[in-house]
Amino acid sequence: MEPIRILQVVTIMNRGGLETMLMNYYRQMDRTKIQFDFMVHRNEEGHYDDEILKLGGNIYRMPQIRPGNYKRYFRLLDEFFSSHFEYKVVHSHINENSSFVLRAANKANVPCRIAHSHLSDLAIDIKLPFRIYARNVMKNHPTDYFSCSQKAGEWLFGKEISNSTRHLVLNNAVNVNEFKFNQSARNQIRKKLKIDDKLVIGHIGRFNKQKNHDFLIDIFKAVHEQQTNAVLVLVGEGHLRPSIEKKASELGITDQVLFLGVREDISTIMHGFDLFLFPSLFEGLPVVLVEAQAAGLKCIVSDSITSESDVTERIEFVSLNKSPKFWAQVILTSTYDHKDTSEKLRKNGYDTVTMADWLYGFYSGQIQLTKQAN
């Protein structure tokens, strides 16, 4: 028998938290029975594209979703679903824009249409009215409502749905074994980066407004003024990276800030950190924060992030209204030990293996219901 094909809808399959989590699920699946295909919204190749193709998945490219091309985009969606009858399950991860994809899937009578919320807020920019519009037209196009946290569900679906049985919080799971603290890996990466005798503050995230790198640099500057052997390690890429590099230079801390770009060895790099710093303006429930906890790190994060993210009692929340010096004092009086958090994560449902089994069962169950209905 041919495997059941599930259409995963994303922006681009780069090494972001959501995308990495999807790949972890994909690798765990019995691909003779369940196969993932991906609808992406960028022309450029994603970091995971080659692996997807090797695992037997297909990649369908759609144009970037912009207000000026809605009409064309809606037409392309209708054309796609009218020629791809094989999809009985569409799982959309593009937040408010999922409403457009699932509306087209609904018109094509796709029986299982999952809207999955991964954020709890929107950036204020010129696109905000269109994003609000997209969220408001979600209506009943989904058959199932998933989110990474209760807060993320309320933001995208509203309280009536998010407090109902139609809504399910699906934990942002990670590969617990991969991230479990490893002293040997820690020694090697710190030696390789020439930071073996430093206080290493780490951050992993795309350089965009949401991640608040500008404030992060101010915090580190305040830390360095009191702890001169401190270094900041930044992992990720994005359009704001040049401006953050410029700011580090202007503050005279260029030599103390390491810009590592996109990396494949995230777990190893995390082992080299002493503390994880994450002052985001808004999030859903970030996968990277679960990874940091899996690595046993103490995490200092903004209070805009849901308290649901504290799975291991290794997170301290700090208000974004507090000054960089206040944040620095929290960091400098923190603990830097690494704890084995693997059992807590597994117990609370944050291990990829367990959650992949659940997701496999959910997809299979939806297909079975479809067969019975027919």
Image: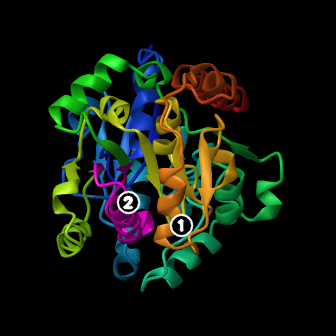
- Magenta highlight on residue 62: no
Q: Quadrant of residue 103?
A: bottom right
Eye-nearest disc, 1 or 2? 2
Task: Confirm whether residue 55 shows in the render.
Answer: no
User: Which residue is pictured at 37% across the width and 48% down the height?
Assistant: 201
Question: Relative to the observer, which residue lies in front, 111 or 191?
Answer: 191
Number of marks in the rendered image? 2
Residue 363 is marked as: none
Image x and y of residue 3, in percent: 44, 21
Image x and y of residue 39, in percent: 37, 48
Q: Residues within 10 Å of mark 1 (few under 14, many from 20)?
A: some
Q: Quadrant of residue 339?
A: top right
- Magenta highlight on residue 220: yes
User: Which residue is pictured at 37% across the width and 75% down the height?
Assistant: 66
Which amino acid, by three-letter code, is at mark 2? Gln
Question: Relative to the observer, which residue lies in front, 209 or 369?
Answer: 209
Question: Relative to the observer, which residue lies in front, 115 or 245?
Answer: 245
Q: Which residue is mark 2?
A: 226
User: Which residue is pictured at 30% across the width and 35% down the height?
Assistant: 269
Q: Which residues are magenta?
A: 203-232
- Quadrant (top left, top right, bottom left, bottom right) of the N terminus: top left
Residue 326 is marked as: 1
Image x and y of residue 300, in percent: 53, 51
Kind of element beneath mark 2: helix
Which amino acid, by three-letter code, is at mark 1? Phe
Which of the two labelled residues, at mark 1 and mark 2, occupies the earlier sequence position? 2
Task: Confirm whether residue 72 shows in the render.
Answer: yes
- Along the horizontal axis of the image, is 266 left or right of 181? left
Distance from Cα at disc 1 to Cα at disc 2: 12 Å
